[in-house]
Image: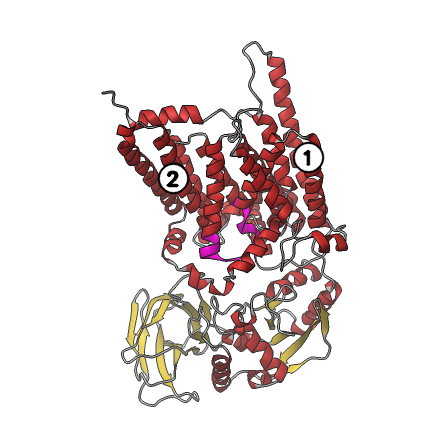
Amino acid sequence: MIRVSSNAVGQAASRRIARPAALSGTFPSAASAVAHRRILAIDLLLVVAVYAAALAFAYLYVRSERFFYYWDFVGYQVRSEWLAHLLAHDLGQAWAAFLVALPSDYNMIPSVPLAPLLMVTGPGRMPYILAIVAVYVVPFALVTGAVATRLVRRAPRRVFWTTTWLVLALPATWVAALRGYPDIGGAALLVLVLYIYLGDRTLARWRSVLWIGSLAGFAIVFRRHLAYAATVELATVSVGALAARWQSAADNARRAVLAVTASRAMVLAVVAVGTLFAIAPAFAWRALTTDYTVYYASYEIPTGVLAVYYGGHYGWLILVAGLAGLGWGLWRHDVDRGAVVLVLGAAGLFAAVWFGAARQTGQHYAYLFTAVLAVGLGLLMRLSTFRPARVALVLALLVNGIMCLSPWAMPRLTAALGSNDTRVGLLSQAIPPLRRGDYASMRGLVKQLRRVAGADRRILVAASSIVLNPDILMAADKEVRRPEEPPLRILWSPQVDSRDGYPLQALIDADLVVVATPAQYHLRPQEQDVVGALVSAFVAGRDFARNYRPLPGAFTLDMDAEARIFERIAAPSLEDVLATLATLERDIDPPPGGEDYWVHLDDRTEIVVPIDERPILPTFKTSVGAGPSALLYFGRLGAVSRLRAQVRLDSCSPARTAHLRFVPLERDGSPRRDHAASLVLTNGARLDMALPDPDAAYGLLQLEGESADGSDAACRVWLEKVSVE
């Protein structure tokens, strides 16, 4: 009996399945070096042409815009510009800022390659988008072209360049990047995973295992939502390796095949998770222990709506042509059918996971689909021998791109053939350069706020839509003010019920409130009661809105919205705060999912809530000595509740002590007698204080200083990771 080892079988299978993907073609031994250099020179010129075309298109697109970007559309631009500024002035601060942001879902890893370019060009929307195109979009196209070469048995160079240009012809490649998302960079890493695996289908080489695992792990740190695609690819690679080994193994070696493949799959997972923890351990632990389906419940979309959204992202032309190319490849002998099956399997599994688990919309989530469809289009162009059909497909894709992304789209043609929010059309959904019709009115609103608010008064924006929200007002203010002028003090305010808390703190702090009517939402209204409750109160002039008066004038915005400014006429008392809280609890039901149940009642105190952490354990920062600081607790008080926190004191003289006092309150705000508890704070101590009176409606936490020598020097107090249990 001849014994065949599973590893030998795997290596033999890899030699048969994996083919070189030299993009410059193959040459007979007698070919001249001159001819080879000519091919390399042509490839270099084509790379330059790809970059020139991509950058020119992005430049024209951004130049056509007249818009105020907000939320995630501008988040990474701000981070990248800030990192570039720090790199230019202080490397130590830049490194510290990078480390501080690393545990966050929005870390600075995507900004690292962009920042050096912004150091040269300076800040701005145009330099930022061009940097994304140069660093992420073009490499994504090149790597996708390289994957296509793994599927064909001849003319790989032609397939590579055809697919690369087709990637750039798809609106789906551009939309998220032109809106400021760098996610395509992480997607390029996952497409590279496919390229590496298709060159070693049995995972016979350990370096393939290490590269695939580390790239998948790094992609998750790059952008957390890529965990779905990374997990799908690791599963697909493992199953594909098992199938490739099993197909080539003798009957008596198949048990060993299972063991070897399982070991490689396990190493893939260990390397991916290890990379995750090595780069960002806090981020990795939170990602593995947090139930994000609860956190993002307000963003979940029904399956039918999702199908129309993502189908319209491409249109029937691209969907049918791309899948037809991959389907045709299954019947051709000059195409690696196993590779086609694997690519289709990865896309299908990702669709099942995304539609079944994540259920969110966003063009930046769909890059794996984009790469697969581009590969299918490349195969269709390669396999078709009917030249007019190829020319017609190219022209159709050009028309699709023009109709979708240019400002010169013909409205009637787009309406007849294009996709929209309710149907999947022949063409992709039109996403031209953004231009606000209310651009001048928004600038007028900002100028009025600057006249009324000055540099000190705080502004609450009671709106959360693409027409008006706090970020839009910040972006408009950045355009209106001169560089030497301070920005408006625009408060953060809750926007989404499942993610945020009551807007109580914002109402306590706000000197001015900008209210847009009708109420402005970016999700279903029932998912944004934290916004709707504010608007309805100000429109009716009831409850907490009675402490404000409307200023003269109104500002007409897009989509028939109108914005008005309300000015505070009375400082909020404790009774006002409790009445406001009662109104919010009545109007926002069920309670918002991100509430920490604390508000501060003075300007010296700050509450810092860690992003994306559950349970929510806030940190209080205050200064005692200039007067008492007060915080209101409005959560549940049990029979044996305890207040726990880590105490940190700073700049406290030996003669000054910091006292903490917890006062139970009635529902009307009056203190319940003989039930207060107090103690002296010690630096570095663990606070663990029993809270009296479980029947109290609320609790008032007071912090004050006492000086033995009569000095007025303030003492900084931190209560970290505060909990009431």
Q: Position of residue 336 (x, y in %)?
A: 49, 30
Residue type at mark 1 is: Ala
Is residue 419 shown in magenta?
no
Q: Earlier in the sequence, mark 2 or mark 1?
A: 2
Describe residue 516's horizontal placement relative to residue 304 as left or right.
Answer: right
Above or below, 106 against 45 in this view is below
Circle 2 SS class: helix
Q: Position of residue 370 (x, y in %)?
A: 56, 44
Q: Residue at x 54, y 45 (%)?
A: 369
Q: Residue furthest front?
A: 331
Instruction: Find disc 1 in the rendering and name its residue.
Output: 389
* Residue 616 relative to residue 533: left or right: left
Quarter-of-image position of residue 723:
bottom left
Could you tell me what secondary structure mostly forms the magenta stretch?
A: helix
Three-letter code, disc 2: Val
- Work out whether residue 420 can be spotted: yes
The image shows residue 709 at horizontal and vertical percentages of 37, 76
The image quarter containing residue 570 is: bottom right
In magenta, the rendered stretch is 353-368
The residue carrying mark 2 is 239
Q: Percent x, y for residue 283?
A: 41, 53
Measure the C-alpha gap from mark 2 to mark 1: 36 Å
Secondary element type, mark 1: helix
Q: Residue furthest top?
A: 30
Q: From the image, state whether disc 2 or disc 1 is nearer to you.
A: 1
Q: Label 1 crowding class (10 Å Cα cut-off): few <14, some 14-19, many 20+? A: few
Which residue: 61% across, 75% down?
Answer: 513
Q: Quadrant of the C terminus?
A: bottom left
Looking at the image, which residue is at 69% across and 49% down? 405
